[in-house]
Amino acid sequence: MLRITFALSLIIIVITSCGDNANKAKDTENPTTETTIVANTPNKNILFFGTSLTAGLGLNQSEAYPALIQHKIDSLNLNYKVINGGLSGETSAGGKSRIDWLLKQPISVFVLELGANDGLRGIPVKETRANLQAIINRVKEKYPDVIMVMEGMQMPPNMGEKYTQDFKETFSLLAKENDMIYVPFLLEGVGGVAKLNQDDGIHPTKEGQKILAENVWKMLKPALLD
């Protein structure tokens, strides 16, 4: 049911080397049980565009949070199809170069998760913000009625107080300026929690991905039911 094609990264250590990690085979997650809602409209695509966090690096793609959100969608009989556009090691500049290819397919909902790798490389926040805005603009130009979701990210304090604060605020400001649904921190409840991250200390485990899915779903669900 999913076309999961790419992969991308998390926060605390440089993630460039993660692109070569092999995914481990896991069983497919069982659908989440929720109240059934009848929907008769054709399938609409939800594009999750991001890093290895979105791709579920180190896990089977069916265990990444976009796939878990698909289960929640299916349990409600909502006619949306999740597309996983996560790519390991992706920066905002890389995303800007890649977005046009993914927009060749119709998109009804666009979920943006980029910037963590910029922060880890110390890329100026102004540059990251400009790249993210360019991506947002291209999506809106191609699909004016798209529902837009921004997933916030944070940097560890060792990046410096000013950089850390400016980086964090970038996501909320972009969400507000572009009328986007805002997930304040994708890794809420997972970042820095050893048992919820893989041995690299960076990428969420299967249980960690479930929490990421909940963080996003509580903000996305009302828009899909509207």
Image (cartoon, helix red, strand yellow):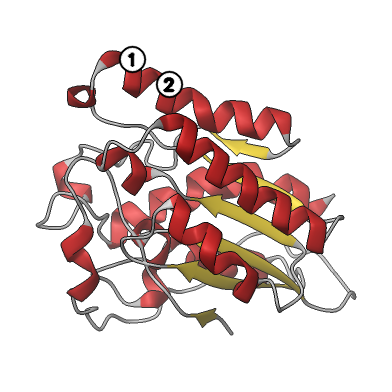
How many marks the image carries: the answer is 2
x, y percentage for residue 97?
53, 64
What amino acid is at disc 1? Lys
x, y percentage for residue 3?
54, 82
**Up-down: is 173 above or below 191?**
above
Residue at label 1? Answer: 162
Q: CA distance from mark 1 to mark 2?
A: 6 Å
Left or right of residue 142, residue 111 in this image: left
Find numbered disc 2 in the image and state the secondary structure of the residue it sits on.
helix
Q: Residue furthest top?
A: 161
* Residue 87 visible somewhere in the drawing: yes
* Residue 152 visible somewhere in the drawing: no
x, y percentage for residue 220?
66, 48
Q: In front: 88, or 53? A: 88
Answer few, some or many: residues within 10 Å of disc 2's Cα (few below 14, many 20 plus, some between 14 and 19): some
Residue at label 2? Answer: 166
**Up-down: is 91 above or below 187?**
below
Quadrant position of residue 106: bottom right
**Up-down: is 134 above or below 206?**
above
Q: Residue at x 78, y 54 (%)?
A: 140
Left or right of residue 165, residue 184 in this image: right
Q: Residue at x 49, y 43 (%)?
A: 215
Tag shown at residue 87: none
Q: Residue at x 58, y 50 (%)?
A: 217
Q: Residue at x 49, y 50 (%)?
A: 113
Q: Pointer 1 and pointer 2: residues touching (CB < 8 Å)?
A: yes
Q: Residue furthest left?
A: 199
What amino acid is at disc 2? Asp
